[in-house]
Every structure is written in structure tokens, then in C-alpha cells.
Amino acid sequence: MKNELIVTAADADRSIDSLMRNVLSLVRRFDADEVVEARTKSGLLYKHNVETGIKTVAVPGAMLEMTPTMLTLRMSVPGASQDATLADLSGATQEQRGAVLGRSQPWVSQRVKQVNNETNETEE
């Protein structure tokens, strides 16, 4: 598997303001409907951890995390490799990492195993 570049529709017009506005609007709508977890056909993944109050939205090219007091946005750098992005998102779930990369959770699982095997072979 090649270490492909991330290409997202957001690369054409990456407006942080627009992304934040759209995602926060969606979070408000999900809050109003008491949604705990959702996935859209476009690749958006939403999870609300009711115990901690943390809400995470992962979309192709970006991930937003809202705690009760902080808002964090992580966006892929145009031209970043998928492997580097996977490494940077190591604290996220495989499902969230897949949403950011526009890939499935099984793809992420397989790619992480491949990268780990390649790293182990190089070290030997």
C-alpha cells in the first residue's frame, strides 16, 4: 500500500470559518435532538460522550473536539500523507481516523498493522 496523499474537497476551499460554522451548527442540531452518535453518507462522524461531555466531529480532512470548556480543531495540511495523518491522530479512535482520511475503520486497522510491520522490519 502506497503512502497516498490526502485529497479532500476541502482542499479546494479550506475555510476554517466555514468549517467551524457548519460543524457547530450541526452539533447544536444534534444536541437539540439528543443525538449521541451519528454517521452521514458524506463521511461525517459525530460522537457525544455523555459521561465526559466531550463531543467529537470527524469529517474528511478535519476533526473537531468540544469539551465543556474548550474547542479544538485539527485540519489536515494539504499534501500531508495518510500515514503521517494517522500517526498524528493516534489518540483518536480508528473510526474517527478513518472519517478524517475518508477511509473505513477496517482500512485504518489494516494500514496501522502494515506500517507497524514495516517499522519492525526496518528496525531488525
Image: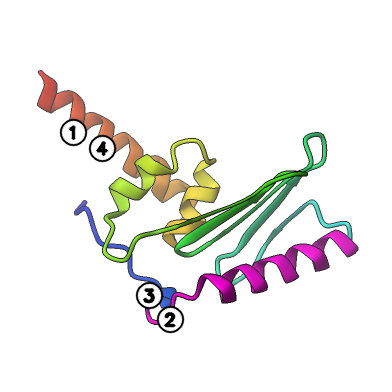
Q: Check contact, mark 4 vs mark 3: CB within 8 A.
A: no
Give the residue type at disc 4. Val
Residue of label 2:
13
Q: Viewer-proximal residue, 76 or 86?
A: 76
The prevailing secondary structure element of the residues shown in magenta is helix
Residue of label 1:
118
Residue of label 4:
115
Residue shown at 49% from the left, 60% from the top: 62
Secondary element under disc 1, as helix, strand or loop, is helix
Q: Is residue 10 above or below residue 55?
A: below
Give the residue type at disc 1. Glu
Give the side of residue 55 with respect to residue 1, left or right. right
- Crowding at dot 1, Cα within 10 Å, few <14 / some 14-19 / many 20+, comes out as few
Marks 4 and 1, how far apart in space? Answer: 5 Å
First in sequence: mark 1 vs mark 2: 2
Give the residue type at disc 2. Asp
Q: Check contact, mark 4 vs mark 2: CB within 8 A.
A: no
The residue segment tinted magenta is 12-32
Q: Check contact, mark 4 vs mark 1: CB within 8 A.
A: yes
First in sequence: mark 1 vs mark 3: 3
Secondary element under disc 2, as helix, strand or loop, is loop
The C terminus, quarter of image: top left
Figure quadrant of residue 58: bottom right
Q: Residue 30 colored magenta?
A: yes
Residue shown at 82% from the left, 57% from the top: 35
Residue of label 3:
11
Q: Position of residue 112 (x, y in %)?
A: 34, 38
Q: Position of residue 100 (x, y in %)?
A: 47, 57
What colouring style does the render use?
A: rainbow
